[in-house]
Each structure stands twice: as C-alpha cells, then as structure tokens.
Image (spheres, helix red, strand yellow):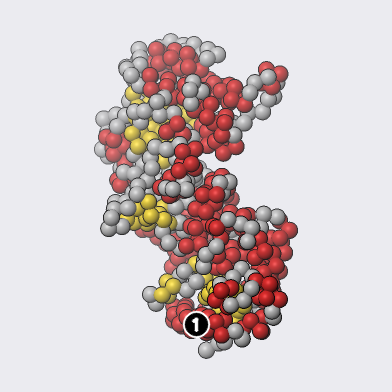
Amino acid sequence: MKIPYGIADFPTLITEGHLYVDRTDRIRTVEDAGKALLFLRPRRFGKSLWLSTLATYYDLRFAAEHQRLFGGLAVGAEPTPLAHRYFVLVWDFSNVDPDPPPLDERLASMSRLERIGNEIHTYLASSLRSFVSDYHEHLPSPVDVETDAFRSLDNLLAVLRRTGHPLYLLIDEYDNFANEVMAAAPEVYEELVHTDGPFKRLFKWVKAAMRGQGLERLFMTGVSPVVMSDVTSGLNMAENVYLYPELADLCGFTAEEVRRLVEELHRENVGRGARPWSVDGTLRMMRQWYNGYRFAVEAEQEVYNPTLAFYFLKHLQRTGRYPRQMLDTNLAADEGKLEYLAQVAAGREAVIDVIRSDEPLEIERLQDRFSLRFMLERSVHDSSFLGSYLYYFGMLTLEGETEFSTLLLAPPNLVTKKLYVERILAILLPLGDARTAALGPVRTLLRGGGVEPLLDFIETTLFPTFSNRDSVWANELTVKTVFLTLLWNDISHLVWSEPELDHRYADLCLLRRPDKRAMSLVDLLFEFKRLSLSDLGMKGEDVRSASRDDLARLEPVKTALDQAQKQLAAYRQALERRYGTALELSSWAVVALGFERLLARPLEPA
C-alpha cells in the first residue's frame, strides 16, 4: 500500500498507484451547488488534494485521459456534462510571502503593505506565465503579460473568450498569508483587506470577471471566513458550502475507511513477517488522537484528520511502531492561533476554559461572517465569536445541539487538547527555566515515586502568582488544570480529564500508551478537592507556615481527603474492570487549601 502522505497532486496519486480515498462522487454535488463557492476546513485537512482533483477533472487538457485517471473512481462511469470543459487557473496563496524581505533598493523604500501588494502582483504574473505555457497549444493568440497583474488577467480573459471554453478559477488557501499578516501586524492587515487594499482589489477583479467576462466558475478553500468577511464587498457572491451535510466528509476519513486501511496494512505487515501489532489497539489510538471532527450538525458521523491518519499509518508501515510524537509537527503551527487569542484576556479565558471545564461550549450559532477585530471586542459578552474562531481552525468541533437548537462545541481529540495544554503551560510558566524545574518532580511521580516534590513545586512556583492574576484562575477546577498541564506527556501516556467510569467522572487519569506498557512508568489516577481559607478558619500566613501533617489533622481536610479516597476506590475498580492486569495504577487524593498549600494521600492497593 503506497500511503500518499504529503502528496496533494491527483494525477500523481492515480498514475503512480498511491492510495486514494475516493470522493469524486461529490463532484456533482459541488457542481450543482453554485458557480462561486467557498469551502473551509482546518489546516492540513486534504483541501489541496480536493482542488487538484477538481482541476484535473475540469481541465480540457485531460479529456483524452479521463478513463485512465477517473475510470476506476465513482465519477468515472457517469461524468457530469462539464467534465474537461474549462481552462483551469490555480492560485495557491500559501505561496505569497506575508512579510516580503526588502531585497533591493526599490523594495527597501516600500512599506510592508506595498511589498505585500508587489508580492501579490509578482505571484499572479508568475502563475499567468505558467498558465500560458501550459495551454499554449489551446490559445488562439499570445497573451500580453503586463506589469499590472490585473490588466494581464483581463488580457487573458479576452483571449479565452475566443476559444469557446470559459475559465475555472481555483484558489487554494485563500486566507493563508492574510491570516499571518493579521496575527503579526493588524494595522497592515486592515489596509490589506479594506478600502482599496491589494487583497480587496484582487477579489473585486474576480467579481467583475464573473460578470460575463469569461470567468465562469470559482472554488476557494481556506481555514476561516474572517478574511472573506473583511473583503466581502470585493467578493460578496461566493456561497458558503462548508457546512453542507453532504460535504461533511469531503475532506476527512470515516471510521470505516480508517478501519479498512488499518486492516489492509496489517495484512501487508503479516505477509512480510514484520513486527506484529494489533488492529484493534491501533484503531483505538487513532480514534483517540485523530477522530472527532464534525463539520455539519446533520452529519451522520465524525471524521478523522486525513493528514494525521496518513502520518501515523506511514510511520507504522515503515517501523512497525506507533509514532513517538502523535502530533505531526506540520500541524504545530495551529498553536499560533491559540497564542493569538491568548493575547487578550477574554481569549485567554476561552483557551483555558476548554481544558479546565470539560464542558462543551454552548453557542447560538456558528458565525459565518465576522471580522477578527469585532470578534475580540465582542468576546467578553458573546462566546459565539471565540467559539466560531476556534471551530474554523479545528480547535473545537461540533459535538451536537441542545433541545433549544443551540450548538455544542468541544475539542475533537487528543491532538487538539495537546495544543491547548501547551498554550496553557506557556501562560502558567512563561519562563523556560521554570518548565525545566518541573521535569524532576513530574518524572518522579511518573516513575511511581511520591507526589510531594510536585506539590512543593506548585506551592512555591505557581501558587504565589495566582493572587496577582485575573479572576480567570479563581475557581474549583484550577488545581486540576495545573496538574493536567504539568503532567501531560503524550509520548508515554494518554491523558484524560474527566474520563467516564461507570457513569461517574474521575478528575484526571493518565494511562500508559499501549505501545509503552513495558516502560517502568505507572498509570496515574487523581481526585481533587479544594477548601477555601474560610472553610479552615485560618489566615493565609498560618496555612503557609503549618506543616502538612498538622494541616492533614484538621477536620475539614480529613473529611475532604476521605471523600476523595472513597471516590478514587470506585474509579480504580472501574479502571481495573476495563483494563485488567495491564494497569499499574498509582492513585492520589489531592486537597488544595486555597491557593496556599496542597496535601495528598495515596490510595493503598486493594
């Protein structure tokens, strides 16, 4: 099985015999949806391959190769009337530099906005020259490529109108460089997309070209509608199709498709006598890390991130082992979106609450037209904007809807939870030295040692900062969030906040990965309680100066520890029934006394 990780060229996949999960039955759906369409999905979700599929299908140059390329696929037997009818022009805006360097004297004298405008013109001119070269046999006359890219495109349309074949424009990652500018230099972004900025002018040209000038169809991919909202008067006729139920799995793999891939890989593995691994165990790992995305309320099932699925399967095929890092580093850039939100108080609170509360975020509806500036201004009062932003970037997904028809958003899988945890860790411990200092106590606990070194670290390093922070930290879930963030280690463990155990929910559970069971590490189970200083009838300085033994003898503390241990015993039994002898469980009841002290008591083996 040739796993096409990182390959987004449709003809290459088909002609070289790579695996292709067929979605060509959706071509007719897309064709019927309209002539100007916007389709959004998170980064690295297979959008570029879909665009390559469309480009190949509609390109008049591939008419003679239709059977070779599409004959074995769903659309092959019954092509639509528009198959291979178009000239196809592809723009990939991930190729546009959001901060072009001033490489010569002319560029050095320009502002950043002017350099971006120059970069856009340079890219459009380059793509036009490639187009003219590729189609030279089909063009009745040369195309005059001028300095101004928009005049050059007008010249192209004038030539194409004489051929009888209209133009199909495919724009990949329409918002790629604009999002980067937005995060780094909002004032430049405003000029880029508003008034007569170069990006807005580009879409005004597209809109005009679709008014009988020869540009007949447009399909755009991107990550969010924010940029399109800001240039909306430039291109206000594009129809949003990204929430169509019939396109919910257009980019993404279903559970059944992933099972077939894993089973085929396993047969291949057995056939060559390679390192053995479990089909069911592999499916569990992939489901926990890569599944969970739902792109329409009416969608019948969730889908896997296809790039991550291929990343995992290719590593497994090559080595016989699961990847050491379950998060492909090519997706790590998504953390930048969380970092951007964390720059404002409301955004920081939203990021923390996703992990801290373990409750879905309820919103009235997904916002499909909003500017980021408006979202951040409104976010204190309206979670729909922040929730929508995180949804489009794949940080939250549709979990369902309530009886009131409001929508529920939640992190889709462990990959996204890891990104949240890393962002929270950067908020908790912004200095690298403090993170390094935490490693020793964390490793002691993971090796089965005591928890007290970690308690000491939290008391001395983190608790003193909480009194100076805003109210985002001051609630019952703070201590659990701190432990989860410090203990998260996806290389060795699966980390679960609020796992369901016999219809009850444990606070925090770390179970060794199936492929790490032989390591000399333990599984961990926690139950947390918190008492306020008023519950103790003590002042902060008195709590800080008392020994842990003296504090543990206080009646409210003894009661809280007893309650936590009783719950731990029930959770441990449920885990042992589920996992049997595979567990080596270390269970801890932890009680926080305000944000001053921590006490812990182990649950002795049954």
Q: Position of residue 525 (x, y in %)?
A: 54, 75
Q: Is residue 13 above or below residue 434?
A: above
Task: State left or right for residue 45 relative to residue 162.
Answer: right
For residue 258, say whether it is visible: no
Point out residue 16 in the picture as x, y percentages from the top left corner. 47, 42
Q: Which residue is mark 1?
A: 563
Which residue lies at the image location 46% right of the left edge and 34% below the top edge? 227
Place of residue 47 in the rendered image (x, y in percent of width and height, measured from the top left): 44, 41
Residue 401 occupies which quadrant of the picture? Answer: bottom left
Q: Nearer the viewer, residue 19 or 37?
A: 37
| Residues packed near mark 1 inside 10 Å, few (<14), some (14 to 19) or many (20 plus) | some
Residue lying furthest bottom: 606
Q: Residue 551, relative to residue 350: is it above or below?
A: below
Q: Is residue 160 visible?
A: yes
Left or right side of 584 for 449: right
**What type is the residue that disc 1 sits on?**
Gln
For the residue pair 27 and 193, the one nearer the viewer reads as: 193
Secondary structure of the residue carrying tag 1 is helix
Question: Is residue 242 placed above or below 357 in the rendered structure?
Answer: above
Q: Residue at x 46, y 38 (%)?
A: 374
Compared with residue 203, is residue 458 higher up or lower down, i.e. above or below?
Answer: below
Position in image of residue 235 (x %, y %)? 39, 26
Identified at 47% across, 62% down, the residue is: 357
Q: Residue at x 52, y 33 (%)?
A: 178
The quadrant holding residue 23 is top left
Count numbered badges in the picture.
1
